[in-house]
Structures are given as structure tokens and as C-alpha cells.
Image (spheres, grey):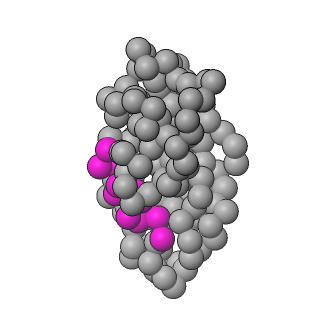
Amino acid sequence: GPILEEFGSVFSIPEPDLLLDSEKNHKILFDIYTDLGGESKINPLLNTVARFLNMHGQTGLSRDQMEVGVIMHGAGAKNALNEEAYRKKFGRSNPNADLLKALDGVGVDLYICGQSLYSRGFSPDDLAEPVKLSLSAMTALVHFQAGGYQLINFN
């Protein structure tokens, strides 16, 4: 795609009947609390964040017109771990590490639920560098939605 070349493959849709308004800025929050990729593959829900950016980039929206946040919690919390913590827990490197860096590189705000992090026996030292700590997923959901973000939740 035009925003993230290595992630978020999408189809080009000629003349769709419904598009986001190209004259507006859009605020989007992805709520990721499952992990369909398991321990060895990229979480497809996290990859959907890249797909969203690429789809709308194809239609002419600039990256600056899309403010995107992600809150990871529940089973999706493990996606936010750094290499050392992931390898210690699962015996392999984090398949989401490069995707996290790429999303951060285009300005996506990445957060982990502190409650999920601690309940799974991890600490902030175990987080991948671009991921920030929220008191809870509920805190992040309220914060972002109060700021006008539209929630995408299809776990």
C-alpha cells in the first residue's frame, strides 16, 4: 500500500460507492483484545491497522488526515512485548515486532492495557519500544473516544 509497503496488503476497489470524506480528518481507535495469529504469526487484527491506512491512502487520504490509535489488551497484550520478554515466554521472537515499528513509524499511537500486562506476569520493562502504557484498556477507550476517535472493534 501507499503508506506501509511491507504490511497491510489491500485490493484496489474501482469507484466504490462509499468512501471516507477526503475533506476531513479522521480519528480512529482500534481495540485489539484477541490474537488470531497465535504465538508464531502476525496478529491479523494488528495488521488490519496497516490495511486501514493503506486502503484509505489508496483513495487519496493523506497520512495526516488519519489519526490512529491502538489499544492492545486481553490475549492481544502479548503482541506488545519486546523480543526478550516474548522469547522468554514463548520461545521465539515476536512476530509482531516489525509491524509495531512500522506502525509507530507512520505515527500510530500504540498502547497496552496495564491491567492485562500485569495480570500476565509482565512489567513495563517487557514492552516493545514504541508501545506506551495505559492504566487500563477501559481508560484508553474513554480517553480516545472523548477526543473524538471512532472505535473499530471486531475481535
Residue 78 location (% of width, % of height): 54, 63
Q: Residue furthest top?
A: 23
Please state if 39 lies on the left or on the right of 50 as rendered: right
The answer to whether residue 33 is seen in the rendering is yes
Above or below, 100 against 146 in this view is below
Please state if 62 lies on the left or on the right of 93 as rendered: left
Residue 50 location (% of width, % of height): 46, 48
* Residues drawn in magenta: 95-106
Residue at x-position 39% and y-position 60%: 6
Q: Residue furthest right?
A: 155
Does the magenta portion include 97? yes
Above or below, 7 against 57 in this view is below
Instruction: Name the magenta segment's main secondary structure.
Output: helix
Please state if 106 lies on the left or on the right of 78 as rendered: left
How many tags in the picture? Answer: 0
Q: Residue furthest left?
A: 105
Residue at x-position 53% and y-position 50%: 10
Residue 16 location (% of width, % of height): 60, 29
Residue at x-position 42% and y-position 16%: 24
Above or below, 51 against 39 in this view is above
Quadrant housing residue 58: top left
Residue at x-position 55% and y-position 25%: 19
Q: Residue furthest bottom?
A: 91
Camera-side residue of 149 and 123: 149
